[in-house]
Image (spheres, helix red, strand yellow):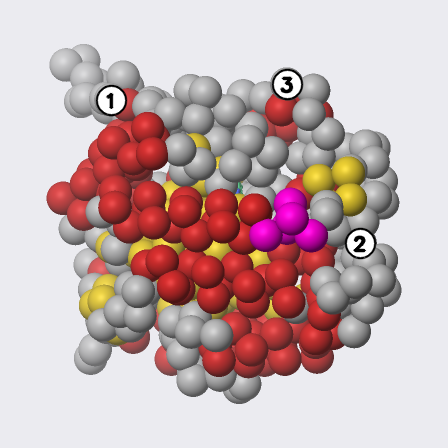
């Protein structure tokens, strides 16, 4: 019987060998924006493990869009490092993409050498407690161009695709949302005005990378922010993104400051896939479901049901890079499951540390820590193994 999870799929002419998409996860492993050996080895291992497509990042597009632990894409000098990542992923059998993002008012002055964060309007962020600088029209145009130039660098570095992050409360979604966009010019007010910035970014990126280069957008299916962009508006935004030339959509969930649980163990597996289905009903390009899809059985069912075309499997690939290969060979019982604790990965970011994993001591130490069979094996009783997330 053919396995729905391991059927190839095409995104604007690029064939991906299976439906497993590793979404961007900021690893905090770059050194002053430069790609490190540690990052290269981390991603090479995930490609070896069998994921169909791997997105690295997010990568910064200018000096106010992230912090030095992010992969940098704002200068040509970063292209060789980006190329090392793209090559490591390709040489180990997966398709590669780089996610580009501007964090807007979610960025912190402390992480930008004292520079003030920027946003559509000067509304304090609940995440950082800082009030951003309201962008002027010229500054908006510069950021649009910075996205385009970062995309050019991604393409020149050899990535198979680029992805624009347009959700989670970062800059593009801040323009979209009436909560964070109080502008009275052509970038604020009506829905048409609030989508303008995001669509200008897509148009500029498309113009630079050309019509035959795969371009993805990661956007919210629901922001879960009271008074923010509605679910209906997000569906309309998806339609406009497709009209602007986007080739695939990855549908994520919530803003960082949102109150609705998104990634913890209590969130049932695959529960947010209905958001991908809602978008898939509106568009005719591949749609990727996301969040808490960490079991091959759930992943298969979502594809088989036509809920989505691909599944984003994030932390489960930190915990076990070989999850895809094990699933392909029906060795589900051998998968080291992510328990959705967030303690080694997400929590580390807030401690300004690189991502690690509670269940995988090799995550981030792929070269340094090899697992070898002991010459003196012992029988060991493991007590309190917990339950899989
Ligand atoms: C450490 C960490 C960093 C993340 N960084 C990003 C990011 O830079 N861009 C993004 O779109 N999502 C980011 N995410 C969200 C993941 O891509 C993913 O949507 C989330 O972990 C839920 O999926 P999962 O349950 O499969 O892990 C991050 C998640 C984690 C755990
Ligand atoms: S630290 Fe916890 S949540 Fe993060 S990948 Fe590992 S098991 Fe999953």
| Image coords of residue 229 (percent x, y) | 75, 67
- For label 1, count other residues whose C-alpha is less than 10 Å away and answer few (under 14), some (14-19) or many (20+): few
Residue 239 against residue 310 in the figure, above or below: below
140 drawn magenta: yes
Q: Which residues are magenta?
A: 137-141
Q: Assess mark 2: CB under 8 A from ligand 1?
A: no
- Secondary structure of residue under mark 2: loop
Task: Check the image and report above or below for 297 versus 140.
Answer: below
Q: Quadrant of residue 78?
A: top left
Side of 135 relative to 77 (left or right):
right
Residue 134's spot in the image, x, y percent? Answer: 78, 44
- Expressed as whole percent of the image width and height from the top left, the position of residue 348 reads 57, 26
The Cα–Cα distance between marks 3 and 1, rounded to whole angstroms, is 32 Å
Furthest-top residue in view? 376
Residue found 62% across the figure and 61% down from its top:
197
Q: Which mark is residue 314?
A: none
Q: Is residue 232 above or below residue 329?
A: below
Residue mark closest to the camera, 1 vs 2: 2
Q: Residue at x 73, y 29 (%)?
A: 116
Which residue is at a point 59% across and 62% down the rendered structure image?
Answer: 198
Q: Which residue is mark 2?
A: 180
Q: Quadrant of residue 308?
A: bottom left
Labelled disc at residue 367: 1
Please report whichever mark, 2 or 3, sits nearer to the chain's N-terminal start.
3
- The residue that mark 3 highlights is 113
**Residue drawn at x 70%, y 75% as measured from the top left:** 192
Query: How would you classify the magenta stretch by its main secondary structure?
Result: helix
């Amino acid at each position: 019987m053919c396995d729905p999870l391991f059927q190839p799929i095409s995104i604007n002419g690029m064939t991906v060998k299976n439906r497993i998409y590793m979404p961007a996860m900021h690893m905090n492993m770059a050194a002053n924006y430069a790609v490190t050996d540690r990052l290269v080895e981390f991603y090479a291992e995930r490609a070896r493990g069998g994921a169909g497509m791997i997105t690295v990042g997010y990568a910064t597009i200018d000096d106010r869009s992230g912090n030095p632990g992010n992969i940098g894409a704002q200068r040509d000098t970063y292209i060789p490092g980006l190329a090392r990542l793209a090559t490591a992923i390709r040489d180990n059998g997966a398709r590669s993409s780089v996610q580009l993002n501007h964090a807007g008012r979610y960025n912190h002055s402390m992480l930008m050498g004292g520079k003030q964060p920027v946003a559509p309007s000067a509304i304090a962020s609940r995440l950082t407690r800082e009030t951003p600088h309201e962008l002027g029209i010229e500054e908006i145009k510069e950021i649009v161009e910075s996205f385009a130039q970062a995309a050019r660098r991604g393409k020149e570095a050899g990535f198979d695709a680029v992805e624009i992050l347009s959700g989670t409360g970062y800059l593009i979604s801040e323009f979209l949302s009436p909560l964070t966009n109080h502008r009275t010019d052509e970038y604020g007010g009506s829905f048409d005005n609030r989508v303008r910035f995001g669509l200008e970014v897509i148009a500029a990126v498309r113009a630079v990378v050309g019509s035959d280069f795969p371009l993805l957008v990661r956007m919210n299916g629901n922001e879960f922010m009271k008074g923010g962009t509605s679910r209906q508006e997000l569906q309309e935004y998806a339609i406009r993104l497709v009209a602007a030339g986007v080739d695939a959509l990855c549908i994520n969930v919530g803003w960082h400051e949102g109150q609705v649980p998104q990634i913890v163990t209590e969130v049932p597996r695959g529960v947010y896939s209905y958001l991908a289905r809602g978008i898939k009903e509106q568009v005719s390009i591949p749609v990727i479901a996301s969040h808490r899809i960490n079991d091959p059985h759930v992943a298969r069912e979502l594809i088989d049901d036509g809920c989505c075309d691909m599944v984003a499997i994030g932390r489960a690939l930190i915990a076990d890079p070989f999850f895809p290969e094990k699933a392909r060979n029906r060795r589900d019982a051998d998968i080291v499951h992510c328990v959705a604790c967030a303690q080694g990965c997400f929590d580390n970011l807030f401690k300004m540390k690189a991502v690690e994993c509670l269940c995988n001591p090799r995550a981030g130490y792929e070269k340094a820590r090899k697992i070898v069979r002991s010459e003196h094996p012992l029988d060991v009783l493991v007590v309190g193994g917990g339950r899989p997330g």
